[in-house]
């Protein structure tokens, strides 16, 4: 309450910046392309058969999707095979990575967070919002913390009304 007896929302009036990672969640569909389906007896990749498949497959079905390339079989897949898939997916997919769903999510967040204007955090307390409705991976929380630490006065996790302190910039000695 202020002097006039009015209730004052101190959180709304504070200099704290609330950063919500959900705002950077890519809405596109996630797809895992498992090259194991192209292996002969789940052991080897026959180049001629694979190239024929790549040539005849409808790659436009991946339009706007986020694709992770992987191999679930215990097989040695030549690097060029993943590269060939990437050349076919790249014109259609939003993004293509080698790895699993976790690496795909990390890649999507890393790309989105690279566009954040970090100067907006300079000498400001920052709360990285926790709990939400979208599946934000821990790697995204680590990435944004790494990015804003050199700028922020302090970093907290949670909600502005209930936070866990993580970092506080040391005071500079006065000359």
Image (cartoon, rainbow, N blue to C red):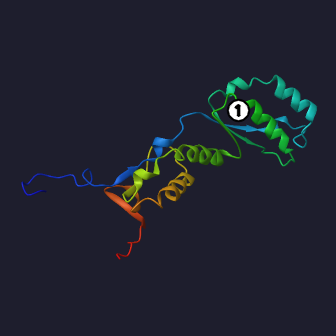
- Examine the image and state in which quarter residue 81 appears: top right
| Above/below status of 39 relative to 169 | above
Q: Position of residue 89 (x, y in %)?
A: 72, 31
Q: Nearer the viewer, residue 17 or 44?
A: 17
- Examine the image and state in which quarter residue 36 appears: top right
| Above/below status of 112 relative to 92 | below
* Residue plotted at (87% across, 44% down): 78
- Say which residue label 1 marks: 90
Left or right placement of residue 120 versus residue 74 in this view: left
Q: Quadrant of the C terminus?
A: bottom left
Using the rendered image of the protein, determine whether residue 130 is visible from the camera's viewpoint. no
SS at circle 1: loop
Q: Position of residue 35 (x, y in %)?
A: 80, 38
* Residue plotted at (87% across, 30% down): 51
Left or right placement of residue 84 versus residue 48 in this view: left
Q: Nearer the viewer, residue 101 or 142?
A: 142
Q: Quadrant of the N terminus?
A: bottom left
């Amino acid at each position: 309450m202020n002097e006039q007896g009015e209730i004052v929302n101190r959180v709304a009036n504070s200099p704290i910046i609330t950063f919500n990672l959900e705002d950077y969640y890519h809405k596109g569909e996630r797809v895992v392309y498992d090259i194991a389906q192209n292996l002969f007896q789940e052991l080897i990749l026959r180049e001629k058969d694979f190239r024929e498949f790549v040539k005849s497959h409808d790659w436009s079905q991946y339009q706007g999707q986020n694709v992770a390339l992987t191999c679930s079989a215990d097989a040695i897949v030549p690097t060029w095979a993943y590269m060939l898939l990437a050349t076919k997916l790249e014109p259609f997919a939003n993004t293509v990575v080698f790895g699993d769903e976790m690496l795909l999510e990390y890649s999507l967040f890393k790309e989105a967070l690279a566009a954040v204007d970090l100067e907006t955090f300079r000498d400001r307390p920052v709360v990285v919002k926790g709990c939400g409705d979208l599946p934000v991976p821990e790697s995204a929380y680590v990435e944004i913390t790494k990015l804003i630490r050199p700028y922020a006065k302090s970093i907290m996790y949670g909600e502005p009304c209930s936070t866990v302190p993580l970092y506080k910039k040391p005071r500079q000695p006065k000359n």
